[in-house]
Amino acid sequence: MKILITGICGFVGSTLAQFWLEAESGLKVYGLDNFSRPGSEQSRIRLVKLGVQLFHGDIRLASDFATLPAVDWVIDAAANPSVLAGIKDFSSSRQLVEHNLIGTVNILEYCKRSNAGFILLSTSRVYSINQLAKVPVEQQDEAFHLIADKPLPSGLSKAGVSESFSTDPPISLYGSTKLASEILALEYGETFDNPVWINRCGVLAGAGQFGRADQGIFAYWINSWLRKRPLTYIGFGGKGYQVRDCLHPRDLLPVLRKQTATGSSQSPKIINLGGGLRNAISLAQLSSWCCERFGPHKVQGKLKNRPFDIPWMVMDTRLAGKLWDWQPQISLEDIFEEIAGHAEQNPNWLEISA
C-alpha cells in the first residue's frame, strides 16, 4: 500500500509515519510539507532515515500536487491547528481559510485524479461554542466536572461530547474551516466514489510536539514548567480548572489501519477519536503533576477569557469503540512522562519548536 501524509513534518504526521512503517511491512510512505514550522527540519531528518520520500510543497497550491506519485490513500495532517488562528494579532484569516479549506480542495482533487481514498484528521472544535459554553459544570479537585443532576444539551452525556452534538456557529474560523472540509470531503467521496473517513480528534500530545500554548498546550506547559518559564491560567477565574482530554497520535494508528483496509463499506463516516474521560485533565491538575515531577513553580492567573474558550471538552468515543473496537491505550501518565523525558533531553525545545 502507498500512502501520502500531508503535513508530514508536523508532530502528528511524523508520528503516524514512524509508527505505521514500524507496524506494517511493504508500506510505502510519501510526505508533503512546506517545512514552514519551526522544528520541521528535525522531523525531516528522522523521516528520511526511515525511508519516507518527502516532497516540498504547499497544499494551498494546486500546482504542487501535479508531480506527486499516485497513492492508495491520503492522510491529511496538514492544518493550522489553533482555535485562535485567523484572529487579529494571531494570524491572517485569509491564510487560515486558504490553508485549512482551499488546501483540502486541492488534496481532494488530487485524490480524484489518483483514485485515492481520503482520511481527514479533523477536530473537536467543530462543535458549537455557544452550546459548550452553557455546559453545566462545577469545580471539584482542581477541575471542572459536569453537574450530574442538571439537564445536558443533546449529544452530551457523562461520557462526553458525541458526534451528534451541535455544530451550529460560532465554532471559530478554525473550526468552521475544518467543518467545511468535512462536508466537502464527504461530497467528493460520494460524487467520485472514493472512500472517505472523517476522524474528529481531541487534544493530541506526546514527545516531540511543537511547544506552543495555542497548539501543543501539554508539551508547552511541561517544557515551560521544567525551565521555570512564566505560565498563566487564562479565564474562568484564573484557576486553571478548564478540562480537556488528551490522546497520543500513536493511538490513532489502529483505526487508520482498519479504515485503509476496509475502504468505504462501513458507516457512519464521522467518528470522535479522543482521550475520553480516562485521559481528561485540567491545567491545574497538570500543574500538580509537574510540581511533583519537577518541583514547585508559580503560575499566574488572568480572569478574562480568550475568544472561543470553553470550560470542559471531553470526547465521547463510544462510537469508535462500536465501529472499530477502539479505545485509547496510552495513559495520561505515560504521555506526560514521555513529554517530560523529551523535555529533559532537549533543553532548547521551546526555542526550536515555538
Image (cartoon, rainbow, N blue to C red):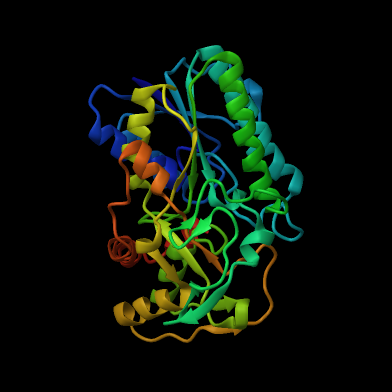
Residue 353 % position (x, y): 48, 56
Task: Name the residue: 50% across, 44% down.
Answer: 200
Residue 128 % position (x, y): 65, 54
Residue 30 % position (x, y): 41, 26
Task: Name the residue: 25% across, 29% down.
Answer: 24
Residue 231 seen anywhere in this rendered image of the structure: no
Side of 43 where 111 appears, left or right? right
Instruction: Report the front residue among 61 and 189.
Output: 189
Instruction: Report the front residue among 184 and 30.
Output: 184
When asked about the image quadrant of residue 214, the answer is bottom right
Residue 214 seen anywhere in this rendered image of the structure: yes
Instruction: Report the front residue among 163 and 8.
Output: 163
Task: Name the residue: 45% across, 63% down.
Answer: 158
Image quarter hosting the N terminus: top left
Task: Name the residue: 32% across, 60% down.
Answer: 335
Can you say whether 319 is above or below 27 in the image? below
Count of residue discs? 0
When asked about the image quadrant of residue 260, the answer is top left
Side of 298 where 28 appears, left or right? left
Residue 25 % position (x, y): 22, 26
